Amino acid sequence: MAELTISGDTHPILKDDYASEWMGIQVLSVGDGHATVRMTLRQEMLNGFGMAHGGMVFAFGDTAFALACNPAEPDADTITVAAGVDINFLKPAFRGQILTAVATRRASTGRSGLYDIQIYAADPGTASSPAPTPSTTAASHTGAASQPAGAATAADPAVDPAFLPGELIAEFRGRSRTISKK
């Protein structure tokens, strides 16, 4: 498991990522093609309706996307960036809730990739802390006993049944492109 703080030791792209630091993003796990991050919604992250500002949810998902796209030991000459993204907001999140984003690479060919990022919200004390394995992202948990059809189940040994990230609030899809650093 990665450190639970933003630092250059967790992942090189976070070394000078002041936006993610300001947001208080914690890295729970990171590996080839996947990442899991968490943060708590603060008052300054809310919109005029008292719910999470869509830009904050997007930026949070974008950090998980970036971590999943870029290896912990980067190539000296290339970086992977977003070629395009879209997000679907499904439910609101509120001050004090804990957001968890789980990013997984779905496809990669040449210099292009496709990533899905699920973003969940849970009240403090209800989200468990173990980081899921990449296959856990197939399960959109809305509670201990509720999963959509086709989701991974506890019968799947790759899924940690103790990981309950809360209710699914957004689906983020990112298309990546590896480019020259220059």
Image (cartoon, helix red, strand yellow):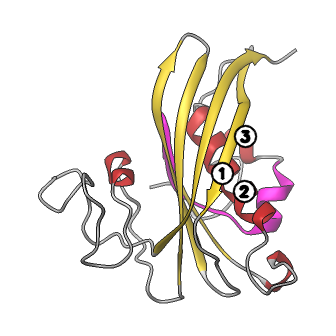
| Residue position for label 1 | 87
Point out the tag, 2 or 1, that comes first from the N-terminus. Answer: 2
The magenta span reads 17-35
| Residue position for label 2 | 58
Question: Could you tell me which quadrant the C terminus lies in?
Answer: top right
| Image quadrant in which you'd find residue 44 | bottom right
Q: Secondary structure at mark 2?
A: helix
Residue 18 in sight here = yes
Residue 92 image offset from top left, x and y in percent: 64, 77
Residue 72 in sight here = no
- Binning the other alpha carbons within 10 Å of mark 1 as few (below 14), some (14 to 19) or many (20 upward) gives some
Mark 2 and mark 1 residues within 8 Å of each other at the beta carbon:
yes
CA–CA distance between discs 2 and 1? 7 Å
Point out the tag, 3 or 2, that comes first from the N-terminus. Answer: 3
CA–CA distance between discs 1 and 3? 23 Å
Identify which residue is drawn at 66% across, 40% down: 66
Identify which residue is drawn at 46% across, 26% down: 107
